[in-house]
Image (cartoon, rainbow, N blue to C red):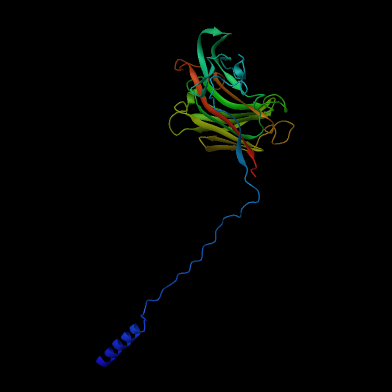
Amino acid sequence: MLIKKHLAIILLLMLISCGTTPVEPTIVATFTPEPTNTPPPTATPTPEWELVWQDEFEGEVIDEEKWSFEVNGRGGGNSELQYYTDFPENAFIEDGKLVIQALKLEERYIGRDYTSARIRTVGKGDWTFGRFEFRAKLPYGQGIWPAIWMLPSTYNYGGWPSSGEIDIMELVGHDADTVHGTLHYGGLGNHQYTGKPFSLEEGIFADDFHEFAIEWEEGEIRWYVDGEKYQTQTAWNTKNHDFPAPFDRPFHIIMNVAVGGNWPGSPDETTVFPQRMEVDYVRVYQKTNEE
């Protein structure tokens, strides 16, 4: 045993003197990546929304190159109680925001107890398809009815509702945590409408500003609140014309605050005046193929 031990020591010393030392073997791991499902790059660019029209309400007065007033006391076809005026008390710019204000009068004005405003872009901003985006704080209360909506700029398919109506946002003031997005279409004697509501999880739309938008493409319209899509519509009709009529023609924007009417009912002793819709901006985008 001692002889074998000495021989092992002598052998080790000889290896060291030759510059060779035993080392642990190195294990090299090999890795084969998992296959991925990443699609190949497309040959054409993805269409994107491009800003084509806007009003940030930064001036001192309402821009008449973009907006006109609809002055009438006919009740909007809904038995509303206001007279729509072009009075500065009913629509004005304040702190970089458009204000549309409904007032209760001490003395009647042309048979009406309330005044308000309804402004529109007809002939100044008319679009077929696009993303229409609004940041607004809404009024509230029994009998108050703010709306941001669109009507056809030319009635190619006949009178309302044959040529369509797009309601981007409506709120009835007694249900102040809920807005509605609706399409109107069909024909004379065959009025049809489809839509959905969107409700806040807490609070009401009078508490703060919210963003309301639609994305309108051929054969499809989508509704959003604060970036959340809550509705898509892909089916509608109009008499004697093929889909996607009537929503394939130029429409314009309307913003107003109504008082009373068939849907919200009349104000009562709980309704506080003035009531105002404040609009921070209006932005219109259209799709373009970027090179």
Against 17, is 87 above or below?
Answer: above
The answer to whether residue 178 shows anywhere in this view is yes
The residue lying furthest to the bottom in this view is: 3
Number of disc labels: 0
Give the image quarter of residue 17: bottom left
Question: Residue 128: percent from the left, percent from the top?
Answer: 67, 33
Against 104, is 205 above or below?
Answer: below
Q: Quadrant of the N terminus?
A: bottom left
Left or right placement of residue 60 versus residue 203 in this view: right
Give the image quarter of residue 125: top right
Query: Residue at horizontal 58%, vertical 34%?
Result: 214
Left or right placement of residue 204 versus residue 147 in this view: left
The answer to whether residue 1 shows anywhere in this view is no
Observer-nearest residue: 222 or 195? 222
The residue lying furthest to the left in this view is: 2
The residue lying furthest to the right in this view is: 240
Against 229, is 139 above or below?
Answer: above
Against 184, is 219 above or below?
Answer: below
Question: Residue 22: percent from the left, percent from the top?
Answer: 36, 80
Give the image quarter of residue 187: top right
Observer-nearest residue: 212 or 174? 212
Question: Residue 131: percent from the left, percent from the top?
Answer: 60, 35
Observer-nearest residue: 97 or 264? 97
Query: Residue at horizontal 29%, vertical 87%?
Result: 9
Question: Residue 39: percent from the left, percent from the top?
Answer: 59, 54
Q: In which quarter of the image is the C terminus?
A: top right
